Image (cartoon, rainbow, N blue to C red):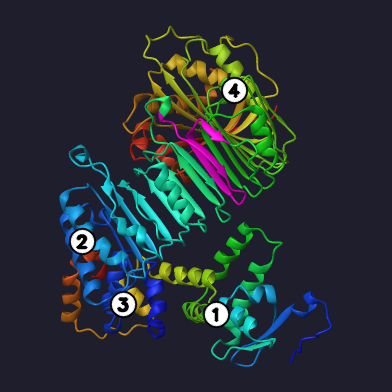
Amino acid sequence: MISQLPQPILHRILSLLSQKEAVQTCVLSKSWRYLGPTRPRIEFRLNHFGGNKETFMSVLNKTLQGYLDHKLCIQEFLVEMSNIDSESVSLLGKWIPIFTRNKDIKTFDLGFILNELAYLYPRYFDLPSVVFEAEPLRELYLKRCKLSRNPVLFKHLQTLSLAKVHITDETFDKIMSSCPLIEHVVLHSCEGLRTIKVNNHHNLNYFDFCACAVQSDDDYCSIEIDAPSLETLKIVGCPNWYHDHKYFPRLKSLYLGDVRLSSLSFDILLSSCNYLKYLTLQNCYGFKELHILSGSVKHLSIIGMCQYMTKSTIDAPNMVEFEYEGGFPRSISFARTSGEWKSNIKLMSFVDFDHNVSSWFRKLNKLLKAISRSEISLFLFQHNNDRQEQPPVQPDTNIYGGLYKPIVVVEQLRLSISGRLSCSGSANFMNGLFRICRPRNISVRKCGTYWDKSYLRLNEFLCKVLVTEREKHCFFWQQYLEEVSMEAFVEYGEKLYGVNLPSECLSLPLPNILFFRQNIRFRLKWIEN
Amino acid sequence: MVTTDEKGPLTAKKKSVIIRSCDGDEFLVSESAAVLSTSLKKILEEKEDRLIHLSDIDNKTLAMVIAYLSTHADDGLSDDLKRSFDQEFVSGKEFDVLKYLVLATDTLQVTCLCYTVAKKMADIMKNKLVEWVRREFDIQNDYTPEAEAEIRRLDAWAWDDRQLEDD
């Protein structure tokens, strides 16, 4: 029944499959014999060939020859290779002119993923100028290419995406000024750009710039972008972003990383964005106090900068998610928050638990109090220096003072500890933590990929004090625990998927459970007090 | 038959059109929705007639396309809502329904919907065994086993990791 569809529609459907899947449709029936291999799209990526370069090159060559022999059109040309060696250069040098000269090419995507032998080969592929003469081109994606000064003949380009591309200001200007319809611009780690100026593009809605690793201050690129139609703006690694008197009334998502801002200019910028939903600030600098005042922002992320600000004030009544990453903020406060919001805090600190703990816990308490109205997910990354074992601290010595009341409820507590962690260190840490917060779920994460000892030790410790020896009441907080259960879980991205542990599992030594690549989560029910 | 009222205000005059399916059902559609289809837009630009007869689209398919067009013409809905509508729109639909939809959207030149439907159809085929696709899409295998083996041999690279699946 599907075979009744006209060929152009079948080709359109087949163009949404991978090259491999499209070729496989050949065996369905005789009428399908040549449908897949004649679709107007070729997509060859070395990793689809399991990295087998020989097969990759010969199949690519054969396929392109087939398109040429049968005068088939290619609208979408997507090739991803590895090193830029003589073989790949000659193959591309032969075929690119043939398939870009026809009137069909709409998408051109060429990239190189350099492997460990990359230093033997040139770092950039000299893109044949014929690509710039492909008039019907709509989308251009390049990775590891070098663009020389060419006449630009395409006028309908909508998407330009350059990653690790060598391009001069002039060439970039030329492309931009030739393409008034451009909507989507991505510039990642491009070399050679010093000054980017974008204006008079009324369709531009997406602009994403990420600087390459720079050697000196002179290498920084400055950006001036005046595009009121922008909906997404991402700038990373640009001290000189000229944004005074620029307005982005349609902006929905703003991501600024390593950008110098002034307090005043940022306020003005924010106040002009009435539809801004996603705001991320990462290591931005240039001001001492951070004020975020926005009625539209729903997702706010602040990464690695609050610890340098003397004061951070957030007034975002519609915020539903707050993300924070870095050291302890010096001062952070939230005005007018919505009814329900979540906070996701990732704290990195490098202070020993055995050392200077009281000030660490005071800071943690202050932070948790500031976000206590939200559903808290707290991730503590801790690095312990390899120090000598401390003399054991008596289980309930009151070195941190009394309970900090009211105690903040933390929905998810995740611990990731590297380095040496003594048993007394673990005990001190838990004592301090449970004076401040009541976690409902606790889990330990590995640091790095290798099997680390502190991961195991901390899990064992938690299992002991929370489950097996809970009734012994060695610690003051054990009396407040009503119920503790353990579950194994797997983690996809930020989400946890629980698997109930069979009871016989609990009698196994903990390392056995952990060894089956299962993580353990402790679910805690506290007595209301 | 709707006639244009020359004296009426401009907005009222151009407000809606009637689209008739091949089986005779008529649908009243706002013009702002109709023009999202490139071919309907052309028809409306070319002739005064407010009644458009589509001889190759049945009423069920047309109703779906019109629901899509009206949703996308609604300025009150956010882009996010429209996106989730699109997902909802194609999910759970039978393959035959999708087939008529892809044909209709191709005729009417509703590019976005045509893409969404084609994508859905491609997703159904993705990662499936040959036998499954044949059964599901009602494709009669007219190859001899030898001929089929020969095709697989010619494009051996495409079958590398699939040997087990067809046992």
Element at label 2: helix
Tell me which numbered mark, 3 or 2, is placed earlier along the sequence.
Answer: 3
- For discs 3 and 1, the disc positioned in front in the rendered view: 1
Residue at image mark 2: A94
Instruction: Work out which quarter of the rendered image holds the C terminus of chain B and state it.
Output: bottom left
Write down the quadrant of residue A358 in the picture.
Answer: top right
Residue at image mark 4: A329
Q: Magenta residues? A: A219-242
Q: Which amino acid does label 2 sit on?
A: Lys
**B62 up-or-down from A325: above or below:** below
Give whichever of A308, A287 is nearer the camera. Answer: A287
Contact, CB < 8 Å: mark 1 with mark 4? no
- For discs 1 and 4, the disc positioned in front in the rendered view: 1
Where residue A502 appears, as percent x and y from the top left, is 43, 44
Residue at image mark 1: B108
Q: Residues within 10 Å of mark 4 (few under 14, many from 20)?
A: many
Q: Which secondary structure type mostly characterizes the magenta part of the structure?
A: strand
Determine the chain carrying the residue at label 1: B
For the residues marked 4 and 3, what is the alpha-carbon distance in whole angstroms?
A: 60 Å
User: Residue at (38%, 11%) from the top-left corner?
Assistant: A387
